[in-house]
Image (spheres, rainbow, N blue to C red):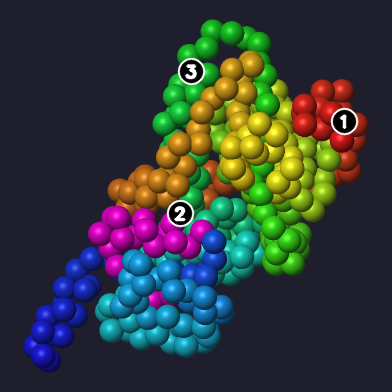
Amino acid sequence: MVLVASQMSKLKYKMLNFALIGAAGYIAPRHMAAIKATNNGLVAAYDPNDSVGIIDSYFPEANFFTEFERFDRFIDKHRREAKRINFFSICSPNYLHDSHIRFALRSGADAICEKPLVLNPWNIDALVDYEKETGKKVNTILQLRLHPSIIALKKTVEKSPLKEKFDIDLTYITSRGKWYLQSWKGDESKSGGIATNIGIHFFDMLHFVFGDLQENKVALREKTKASGYLEYQNARVRWFLSTEYFDIPKEIRETGVRTYRSLLINGSEIEFSNNFTDLHRVSYEEILNGRGFGLIENRVSIETVVAIRSQATQKLSDTHPLLLGK
């Protein structure tokens, strides 16, 4: 039995070793699935909450910690025994991302961080310095940049001979219960507010497809919904975000669906809801092949949401259709 255990230990470390911070969070299972799908191993996971039974579906042998100090000790022991962690997957609350990224880099590992990467642009500047000091890399999950429909749209925009800008209506409504505002997500100092928490990857996608951001105005900003106007090099965008179930169009609600995504471009719908959950696996594949998105790719979207949460709301001449009558 001792011989078998020894053989298993040797095999264990032939694959890339992952650690995960924020194992009890909503998005953590997608990271676990992506680690498993890319044939790597989860060595350790940490979360102050212990509702993490989902780990058994992917890595039942993973070590789990509810105290950061013990997690730190375990990671450091592996580093000193030349069994270091190769990647940290970071799924913790938004305001802790930059701290946990620094911990990953100091531990001799690269980081894979959920959106939003950080809450403020100056946090990016500090992490750039950390990358230089440690020689390690920060990778981010900008999944919509990898969606086939979005890639096709970007190519269409690049080939378009029109000098006029595209007219866009972006709508994203993801229903949340009463728990939402009682959690850290309802605290703007921790989540960055609704535009940061649920809108960041859409704002990144708009910049990715339509170019430099030129104008940013806000018409509505509440704890559960926000709306405004963005103008890019190649597009004018009316956007609406909400966690309110009854903001979903009635005909959609009647189908039992609780999430609604819509991207209208010059009046035509672009479908990008399919394969949405598979994009974490694709993101991991790209990162492991050296094609991940780094710190700098995040700057425009972070600057966008900071402006949205810090500026005064105003009446706009061209508002999103869902704001009419509200």
**Kind of residue indicated by mark 3:** Thr
Q: Residue 139, labelled with which disc?
A: 2
- Name the mark nearer the viewer: 2 or 3: 3
Instruction: Count every numbered label the image shows and give the total.
Output: 3
Find residue 236 and report its image quarter.
Answer: top right
Foreground disc of the pair 1, 2: 1
Looking at the rendering, the stretch of residues picked out in magenta corresponds to: 27-45
Along the line of sight, which residue is nearer the eye, 125 or 173? Answer: 173
Q: Which residue is pictured at 40% across the width and 71% down the height? A: 55
Of badges 3 and 1, the one in the foreground is: 1
The reply to whether callout 2 and callout 3 are in contact (CB within 8 Å) is no
Q: Quadrant of residue 220?
A: top right
| Residue 194, numbered circle | none
Q: How many other residues sit within 10 Å of disc 2, few (<14), some (14-19) or many (≥20)?
A: many
Question: Residue at the spot x=23%, y=66% of the render?
Answer: 15
Q: Mark 1 Cα within 10 Å, few/some/many (few <14, many 20+)?
A: few
Asked if 244 appears above or below 326 in the picture, the reply is below
Q: Dot 3 corresponds to which residue?
A: 156
- Residue carrying label 1: 325
In the image, residue 163 above or below residue 99: above
Q: What is the distance, in whole Å, between disc 2 and disc 3 at their CAs?
A: 27 Å
* Mark positioned earlier in the residue sequence (3 or 1): 3
